[in-house]
Every structure is written in C-alpha cells, then in structure tokens.
Amino acid sequence: MRKIIVTSALPYANGPIHLGHMVEFIQTDIWKRFQQLIGNQCVYIWGSDAHGTPIMLRAEKEGITPEQLVSRIHQEHTRDFDDFHISYDNFYTTHSPENNELVCEIYRRLRDRGDIEIKTIIQAFDPIKNIFLPDRFVKGECPRCSTKDQYGDNCEHCGATYTPMELKNPRSVLSDATPIEKESEHYFFKLPNHEQFLREWTKEHIPPTVANKLDEWFTTGLQNWDISRDAPYFGFPIPDAPKGDQAKYFYVWLDAPIGYMASFKNLCSRRPDLHFDEYWSANSKTELHHFIGKDIMYFHALFWPATLHGAGYRTPTAIHTHGFLTVNGQKMSKSRGTFVKARTYLNHLDPEYLRYYFATKLTDSVEDIDLNFEDFRLRINSDLIGKYINIASRCAGFITKNFNGQLSAELVDAELFSSFVAQASSVALHYENRDYSRAMREIMLLADKANQYIADKAPWTLAKNPDTVAQVQAICTLGLNLFRVLTIYLKPVLPKLTEKVETFFNVDAFNWQDHAQPLLAHTINQFVPLMSRIEETQIAALIQSTKEDVI
C-alpha cells in the first residue's frame, strides 16, 4: 500500500471559486479517489490562502477584520467543494497556529544555515495611498515580451518573472498613479545556494515539458527571492524583524505552500493513523503530489523544493501541472456569460456533468482545455445518457418485471465479460498517469460494445415470445454486469452516481477489484433514473445567470 499526500493549489480567500479553479480541484479529486479505490492510502489536504495585502484591503473596505473576511470566504469555498463532491481530508487555512509555528521554524533553519540575506531595496510605492505596493497591485507591460496589462510579478503570456518596477509603464491598481521608488529593508532567501540541488531534483521529479521551462530560469540565472513585505500587511510577522511601523511580514508565497504542511499537521491531531514526521521528514518513504496550474509552477518547482530542502524536510515526489480553462474558445468573460462561478453552475446543473466533461479533456500535459457549452451538452447526453446509462435502462426493467429482480446464475458470454475485465489495467494506468481523457475514451468504447451486444440480442423482442423469454434473463444479466464494470471504472469521476448504482445493485461500495468478478444469482433493486439529459434551456439559463452575477 502506497502512502500518499495530494494537494491542490490553495484558493485565495478573497473571492468566489469559478470553473477555472474547478479544473484543478476535480483533477486532484479524481486522482485521489482512484488511489483509494485501488487500495492505497491517499490523503488530500489543502486550505485557504489567507494572507496578503488584497485581503487586508478588501476587509478594510467592507469594515470587517481580515480574519472575518477569510472565515466567510472559507465557508463559501467549503460549500462549493462539498457540492462538487471534492473528497478532501482537510481544507484548513494558512492563517493558523500550526502554519505560524512551521513558517517561523523553517525561516530560522534557513537563516541559521546562511540562506537568508537582509538588504535595502527600492520598491514600488503608491504616493496617493501611501502604501508599498504588492506585486499584484502594480500592472503594466511585460519587460520581456511587452504584453500589456500584466501583473507586477510574472507575465501570463510568456511566463517571465520580474519586479513591479521592471514593468514598462507601471501603474498602481489602487489609485492608477504611477508608482514611485522608495527604499525599504527586506529579507531574501538565497535561492542560488540551491541551484545544484534544484537542477538534479527537477530532472527526476518534473515532467520534461515543464523542466524545459525551468531550464530557461537556470540559464538566465536564479535570483535571491524576497520573502518579506512591509507593514501594513496581513500575515505572520518575521520573528527577528523590527516592530511597529517598520515591521516586516512573511510574504504570502512563503507561508502559503507551508500551509500544506500545516493542514496535514492539523489533520494529524484528529487522525491517530497519521504521523507528521512519517510524511514530512527528509527520509520519508511516503509520496507527496502537488496539483497546480502552470501560472504558479515557478513557485512550486523552484522556491518550494529549495525551501524544504534547506530546512531539512522532504521534497515533493511530483508536481503535476495543468493549463488554463477557456470557455467557448476564449478567455472567461463576464459580459459573454462565460466567467462562471462554481455556485452559479451548481444552481443550474449537476456537478457530475462537469466532472465527467473535464475528465474527457484532462491529460498529463500543460495545454489549456476548453469548455464549449454546446460540446459539453452533446457530450454528456451522448456519453453518459445515451451510452453508459442506456445499458442499464435497457436491461434492468426486464430483470425486475420478468424475473423478480433475480440475476441469472451464470454468464451467457464469458468471453465478452472477460474483454471488459481485461481493460482494467489500461484504464488504471491512464488514471495513474492523469491521462483521464484516454481513460474516458476507452470506457466509452466499451459502452458502445455493450450497447451493440444488447441491440444484437434485442431482449425486448425475445420477451414478447414465451418460448424465448427465458433467454432475456441471461442477456440482461450480462448487460448489467458490463454496466457494473463500467461503473467501477468511472467511480473516481462520478462518485455520487456510483452510489446510486451500488444501491440499484443492492451491494456494498465498489472497490477496484470488484470489476473482475461478475454479480450472479443476486437480487437487484428496481431501477430508477440515474441522470437527466441537459437541455439547451439549462445552458441558456446558466449563461444568463452568469451575466447577472456580481463578481
């Protein structure tokens, strides 16, 4: 049994979850559910990213404390995750005593080994608001590729990283004023000290497509990383820094990933089977898998492993990077009704529609994926309703009506059943490699095969003739067993629908090994509709509601 921690990127506690976020959370959840289904121990931990100037300023604007804002947004996010059937073990917060303790401990370890440097820098300052500007509160043109309207830390177009004042034509997001330069003493993590380690580590733990991008930064030369921010700031104060107006706080990007550790530590206090050191010590034999978007790959693939290595903790087993979500081929847009909040989607459509659709799109690459609403509607109606569920709906009624819900004692075509069972290793490999798209294609090809078998045997015709009605039990028993195998294969993607199928079959929860053994001489329950078709009016209503949303 493998022992695994999985994480998703920490959602920022400053606004609603949207479908772009859900790509990653669903991707992570499918992988976690698959690992558990095959018998591994897999723990999914993460939390709210709760620090930074944006949260401080929004709380101030609303007349509440940052803690109150974070608590409210945390509850909203939790509700969204629960309703999308995300099976996390602990969704915590980076504003926690565990995180404060770990951040200070890691900082002191890095400081004591000579990895921290203090120096005076010149940074962006808003002369109107009288505040040092965080990277994301300065916008301008990328200094490398000249793309306009980029934030002050990295370019979404070319991936370059830089300081806010390196932007061309910079402006303050708070006041639209041109930032001025002002001196301030800051704390830096000496990332170049870990270059040799990082070069070796990335070769073993980062996919080639992502590693090639990291090579650009190695070629350019790793730079010291500013891990401090000036007051006023919502975060953890640096232990040995000045106090009051001159206080320094840990930059949110230092304490955010450490929040993974803090979330796990918090979970350990409630789970006697989990031990912090077993999973996080430098010699740990467990696995640590991060699922992240390509926009924060730099932080997770360079700063994070270097920080862990320098502080004497284990480093990630793998960092799984995905692309962005476009909607109808374009960047999400409120005016077009395509900037869809998770809650707005849930108000109109079954979450498992989206879980399946994303699964048909997700691979192990960093390519962007597109949510095309018309393709989405047609794919769900065709694959889930017209192919998969259709198998059960064509067979179940005959078993209930003609044979008192009793399945036959043997398989009429063991070879056909065996061909479905034989596909398990391939489907499992695709899940393991996060190539869900290939897994879904293989499952739907099997669904086609099952439907073709039922069509060829035509039990609806045989049931009308007293001389052939007995054959119907064997045909439909096989059809339902093929449906059961497909359900087991789809369980990581469609957990709630699977629960309904388990109830229909009158059995305990499926595990992966159940696919190999047919269900025979067993009484099933009456079949009830499992899922409805998506109508065009539902999509239209979703888009209209999105246009009316307040973001």
Image (cartoon, rainbow, N blue to C red):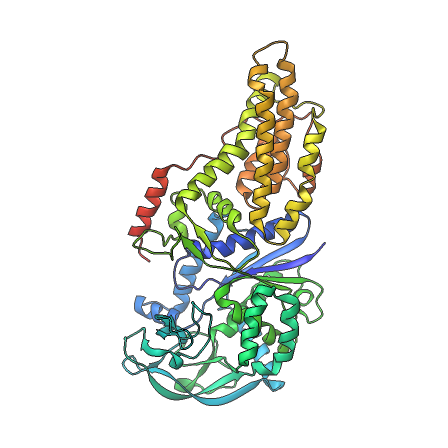
Report the residue that reaches farthest toward the front. 145
Residue sitting at x 59%, y 23%: 456
List x then y, in percent, for residue 97: 53, 70
Counting the numbered discs, the total is 0
List x then y, in percent, for residue 192: 58, 82
On-image quarter of the C terminus = bottom left
Nearest the viewer among 498 and 89 is: 498
Q: Is residue 40 left or right of residue 129?
A: right
Residue sitting at x 42%, y 40%: 377
Residue 141 vs 510, above or below: the answer is below
Residue 340 vs 441, above or below: the answer is below
Nearest the viewer among 44 and 330 is: 330
Q: Quadrant of residue 514?
A: top right
Q: Is residue 258 visible?
A: no
Residue 229 vs 21, above or below: the answer is below
Q: Is residue 419 visible?
A: yes
Q: Quadrant of residue 243?
A: bottom left
Q: Is residue 464 left or right of residue 156?
A: right
Q: Is residue 485 left or right of residue 172?
A: right
List x then y, in percent, for residue 297: 52, 67
Residue 118 vs 470, above or below: the answer is below
Residue sitting at x 31%, y 82%: 130
Q: Quadrant of residue 445?
A: top right
Report the residue that reaches farthest toward the top. 466
List x then y, in percent, for residue 96: 51, 68
On-image quarter of the N terminus = bottom right
